[in-house]
Image (cartoon, rainbow, N blue to C red):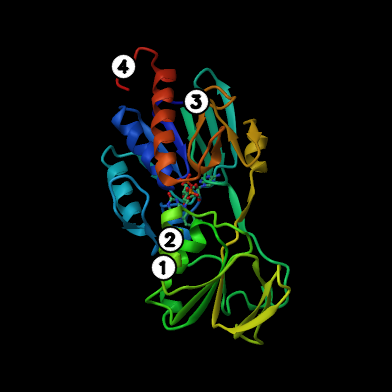
Amino acid sequence: MVLQSDMYDVTVIGAGPVGLYAAYYAGLRDCRTKILETYPQVGGRLISMYPEKEIFDVAGHTKILARDLIAQLTEQAMQYNPTVVPNERVTGLRIRGERVIELSTPKGRHYSQTVVIAAGCGAIVPRKLDIPHLTDLEGHGIHYFLPSFEPLRGKRVLIVGGGNSAVDWALSLTGIAAEVTLVHRMYKFQAHEAMVDRLLASKVKVKFPYFTLKEVMGEEKVTGAVIWNERSGKEERIEVDAIVLSIGMLTNLEPFREWGVNIVGSGIAVATDMSTNMPGVYAAGDIATYPGKILLISAGAGEAATAVNAAKEYIDAGALGR
Ligand SMILES: Cc1cc2nc3c(=O)[nH]c(=O)nc-3n(C[C@H](O)[C@H](O)[C@H](O)COP(=O)(O)OP(=O)(O)OC[C@H]3O[C@@H](n4cnc5c(N)ncnc54)[C@H](O)[C@@H]3O)c2cc1C
């Protein structure tokens, strides 16, 4: 028997940008809302991985620092006073009855009529390269995330990768680092075209296509790198103080599979209303997948609104507010 006072209308798992927006939208729809977050702080990857990076592709902002976007999303969400529970990782989800979902964490249980899973990509580990000295020098010049740019001020930095993150890091570091070099092994960038144009017109030394990092040099800290051109077979040694690897993330969605949600590829499969295969359970943001999915904050915000509208309708079929 679940006490009425313990029962929420919508519980959001994850307080990243998408979870925060889902909480705001649930408040707007007059839902009693709770957010459960593993970490002590809200903000998801924008705070844990790139608080100082500028974001250029969020509606209504020409550019905004990740940290400032989270501050605004938090203020927006808090207007409706959701219950925010930090330091609680949801480890279990069970349907206990009609419109009764039980969420378990190492600290206790939470009850909700509906759940929006906005957990990003689950447990993530940066992808690494199997090359000499890389792991030995982690923390001594090898970086996978840049929570602050200050440690790289005045340094010579090598960025490895050709996606949005690599291109954005490279651009953000010009003017802070003494010198920025970017190597990319593919024949094309996987970043937004306008940002690639900006990169190619910038002071960043771009080595592409077919350039890979072959070896990290240095005993106690990074002092250089060996770069290899796959096509010409030629090697080049460059002096650098820091190397940022931005070659993707390995995700682990196994814990979600155990809850009973349908996992397809690297996400939770959702229908067009963001519902999963479990009644009352929705997913939004990077964790949700469907044909044509893109992993962007703006897309996730739209999905959050869709998920909450569907959840509201599930709770109250007569609700007209969408
Ligand atoms: C370096 C980098 C740069 C990027 N730049 C841009 C950009 O410029 N523009 C753009 O649109 N996108 C960008 N992205 C992508 C963007 O960060 C993601 O699309 C966005 O973070 C997705 O938001 P989310 O809320 O779905 O997930 P996340 O931001 O990952 O947040 C998920 C939250 O859920 C929590 N969580 C996970 N599991 C649980 C659990 N079991 N219980 C409780 N809490 C849980 C996590 O701790 C986390 O706080 C970038 C990504 C990276 C890595």
- Which sits earlier in the primary sequence, circle 3 or circle 2? 2
Mark 4 to mark 3 CA distance (whole Å) = 19 Å
- Which sits earlier in the primary sequence, circle 4 or circle 2? 2
Mark 3 to mark 2 CA distance (whole Å) = 34 Å
* Residue 163 rendering spot, x and y as whole percentages: 53, 57
Mark 1 to mark 4 CA distance (whole Å) = 51 Å
User: Please, what is the three-letter code of the amino acid marked with disc 1?
Assistant: Ala
Residue picked out by circle 1: 201
Q: Are marks 2 and 1 in contact (CB under 8 Å)?
A: yes
- Which sits earlier in the primary sequence, circle 1 or circle 4? 1
- Which sits earlier in the primary sequence, circle 4 or circle 3? 3
Neighbour class for label 1 at 10 Å: few (<14), some, many (≥20)?
A: few
Disc assigned to residue 197: 2
Residue picked out by circle 4: 320
Quick one: SS at disc 2?
Answer: helix
Placement of 311 over or under 68, stated as above or below: above
Mark 3 to mark 1 CA distance (whole Å) = 40 Å
Quick one: SS at disc 3?
Answer: loop
Neighbour class for label 3 at 10 Å: few (<14), some, many (≥20)?
A: few
Neighbour class for label 2 at 10 Å: few (<14), some, many (≥20)?
A: few
Please give the name of the residue rendered at 33% of the width and 53% of the height, measured from the top-left corner.
Answer: 69
